[in-house]
Amino acid sequence: MREIVLDTETTGFEPAEGDRIVEIGAVELIGHIPTGRTYHQYINPKRSMPKEAFEVHGLGDEFLADKPVFSDIASAFLDFIGDAQLVIHNASFDMKFLNAELSWVNLPLIAMERAVDTLAIARRRFPGSPASLDALCRRFGIDNSARTLHGALLDSEILADVYLELIGGRQPDFALSASQAQTGPSATADDWRPRPRPTALASRLTNEEAAAHSAFVEAMGDGALWKKLT
């Protein structure tokens, strides 16, 4: 399964009020494993950068002046994400901006159903606990020391680590591939799982220990849990 962990930086909170995307970063996962393929693009928003947004990501007017506008990079971005599932922290925010930008250049929108929201996952798993990206890094022991400012590619790389922890670690189902697990012509991908021993191991209890245990359980009375389990 191909997934794209994605993040954007913007000039503000509302595309309907003229805010635009200024950076997109994305990391490719296949089978929950990072492939090393990434997408990163700065974008000229064709408007000035508000002071509050600049303090978040540090992308100013002078830096963005010679960057391409969204219409110039839209096709390459869509080619990179393809039909993959999108993994986004606070997905409604990024999807709102991506679809606004796509609509302005008359390109197909991205269905919201394609987005997996790691913020929602974190809130379900840890109700009442902080669920920001930094808070999740602290919870899972993920190094985010390079995150002095928000940056779309760095945040995507960090989010990929967080996402894998949220779904159960870097090998969420602990499954091996069929090629790794196969040991014979009829082997399946689940053959790595432990099987019962063909011959049970001999008891390591001595006769005296077994008798002492039986006497101990008997003394506990008829309602003893041990009697129900034996």
Image (cartoon, rainbow, N blue to C red):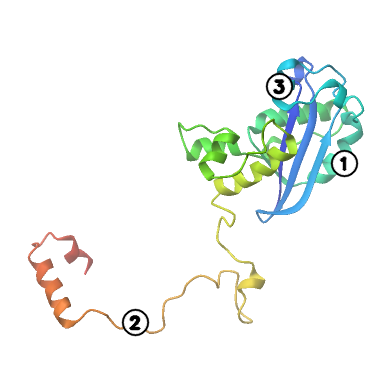
Q: Which dot, 3 or 1, sits closer to the camera?
A: 3
Q: Residue at x 60, y 77 (%)?
A: 187
- State the SS at label 1: helix
**Tag 3: residue type?**
Glu
The quadrant of the image that shows the N terminus is bottom right
**Residue at 60% across, 66% down:** 176
For badge 1, the amino acid type reads Ala
User: Which circle's residue, 3 or 1, is located before the other in the chain?
Assistant: 3
Q: Residue 55, which numbered label?
A: 3
Please state the horizontal and vertical placement of residue 99, each as a whole percent of the image. 77, 30
The answer to whether residue 224 is above or below residue 164 is below
Assess whether mark 1 and mark 3 are in contact (beta carbons under 8 angstroms): no
Q: Is residue 158 left or right of residue 174?
A: right
Q: Which mark is residue 201?
A: 2
Residue to which mark 1 is pinned: 76
> x, y percentage for residue 133?
60, 35
Give how far across and how far down residue 156 sits, in percent: 70, 40
Q: What type is the residue that disc 2 sits on?
A: Leu
